[in-house]
Image (cartoon, coloured by chain):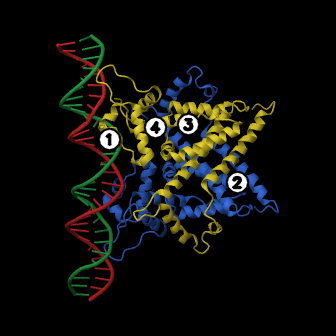
Chain colours: A blue, B yellow, C red, D green
Amino acid sequence: MVRAHDPEATLALLWDGPTRPRRGPRHNLTVEEIVDAATRVAEEEGVGALSMRGVASLLGVGAATLYTYVPGKAALLALMVDTMIGRAPLPHTRPGTWREKVRSWAHEDLRSYREHPWLIELTATGQPVGPHAFAWTDSALRIFEDTGLTAHEALTVVETVEGYIRGHAAKVVRADRSRERTTPDGRTWNTVQEAFLVTRAGEAGRYQAIERLDTDGPDPEEVFAQGLEWLLDGVESRVRTASEPGKSH
Amino acid sequence: MVRAHDPEATLALLWDGPTRPRRGPRHNLTVEEIVDAATRVAEEEGVGALSMRGVASLLGVGAATLYTYVPGKAALLALMVDTMIGRAPLPHTRPGTWREKVRSWAHEDLRSYREHPWLIELTATGQPVGPHAFAWTDSALRIFEDTGLTAHEALTVVETVEGYIRGHAAKVVRADRSRERTTPDGRTWNTVQEAFLVTRAGEAGRYQAIERLDTDGPDPEEVFAQGLEWLLDGVESRVRTASEPGKSH
DNA sequence: TCTTACTTCGAACAACGTACGGAGTTCTAG
DNA sequence: CTAGAACTCCGTACGTTGTTCGAAGTAAGA
């Protein structure tokens, strides 16, 4: 098998699938089964708990066996990400105007990241681009086909929104986790930290602006939705000038 | 020493510093020295290469020694992050209108993340809130003191922009890294992947929109700046309605 | 001065990714 | 039809990692 740390092996597997050998015993497993098992682990116990040994034993094989199917852990993670992306509906097939398409894609993305927190963790660290990710980007660009934006501008918009989504998804997922994660004595990390911060925040005018916050702070999902609309307002004004006749750049 | 995985120990260290013991031999090190050494490692070789043993040997002590100063690796990382945040100038002290303040904070943040890629990696995974982070948020809120926005709304804006910055910083840092990281045979990950994708992108109309991209795609830093302005346009229109007399909410 | 609470750190533990090499299996070349 | 090449499988092992333990030494309070 191809050595790890060789991005070419991972890319080949991502795009062309496994190469069937001409000799030797039949495989008892498929790459798909391995990816599924790994995904199940990540889903239930988080990426942190995902180990080659764990996945192998879930499939009833030795750890070393996995390396006949997959060049290494990094490639396995890349496969997990790309197959997950493949499950999302393509953005340009959504109904409505470009703005409605972008909005529903963004909200669905956030929902998906919350449902599969491992996804945001893995995409944050950067994965090789697989066929589904590629197709997805292509689809996102197509949203702007009739807007008068150049392909270049469309990509700017797509990347802007993508960055926005990911930044907020990471924040929301973080908040979700700290609400679930518990200390040995049963309290959540969130309550521990909040209790701690409250004792400090009140310190005689040290934090003037924070003191003025009467409530708990805004709901992260509302923040997300609000900021997204602001961003889209900006994009919209750009789209309007683009569609003006005679101003094709 | 206090057990790891206990957030209270980390918070106490973060906010109140080390507690001087009343008996026993003097410490040969300080927490600061340890944080500095760890930061140096992260700066030069990345967070991935940061190990307790490595930091310890850099300081000429055994690995176990560090645990008398710091409850665990997680706490050390939290300390690194908070002291780094403490080095950034407070946003409300910047010159200009609220919009100029936000803009210069955002651009400086991005610069800082690019200069210290470990920072974005660590803040992405979520760290306990330290005193500097707290003071920083307080300062960011103060930017909007004279805008007519409520504290609640100001926090919404701050978090929106923060999420935006972090999402894009992660992307830019990722791009930086793939440009630097090399395969065993000397090519960068970036060139390998790009060469690979080019062979696939041309496949007979499979990727219609991507084909139309004549150039290399926009410069990530330009994307960042552009999207930020769009976002700020949206915020500005909100600020304008807030400062209208009689419309205080 | 004795005791108590420390610091230091070699050694060890459990878990990790992954390379190695031998045993067994299937296909193909001759 | 058979020899051996090419493969799968996997026990074992290597080198890491974070962290704990316990022994040895040190400073200060009683």
Residues at discs 3 and 2 both on one chain: no
Instruction: In the rendered structure, find residue B80 and report the number of the disc placed on it.
Output: 4
Secondary structure category for the residue under label 4: helix
Residue drawn at x 56%, y 63% as measured from the top left: A134
Residues at discs 1 and 4 both on one chain: yes
Upstream in sequence: badge 1 or badge 4: 1
Q: Is residue A68 visible?
A: yes
Badge 2 is on which residue?
A100
Nearer to us: label 3 or label 4: 3
Indicate the amino acid at tag 1: Ser
Secondary structure category for the residue under label 1: helix
Residue drawn at x 57%, y 46% as measured from the top left: B111
Q: Which chain carries label 4?
A: B
Upstream in sequence: badge 3 or badge 1: 1
Indicate the amino acid at tag 4: Met
Instruction: In the rendered structure, find residue B57 and report the number of the disc placed on it.
Output: 1
Indicate the amino acid at tag 2: Glu
Q: What whole-number distance in Å separates the C-alpha atoms at marks 3 and 2?
A: 38 Å
**Are discs 1 and 2 less than 8 Å apart at CB?**
no
Q: Mark 3 lies on which chain?
A: B
Give the left or right position of residue A80, taking residue A3 as reference: right
Q: Position of residue B109 (x, y in %)?
A: 58, 42
A123 or B32: nearer the viewer: B32
* Callout 2 crowding tier (Cα within 10 Å): few <14, some 14–19, many ≥20: few
Seen in the picture, residue A220 relative to B224 is either above or below; the reply is: above
Nearer to us: label 2 or label 4: 4
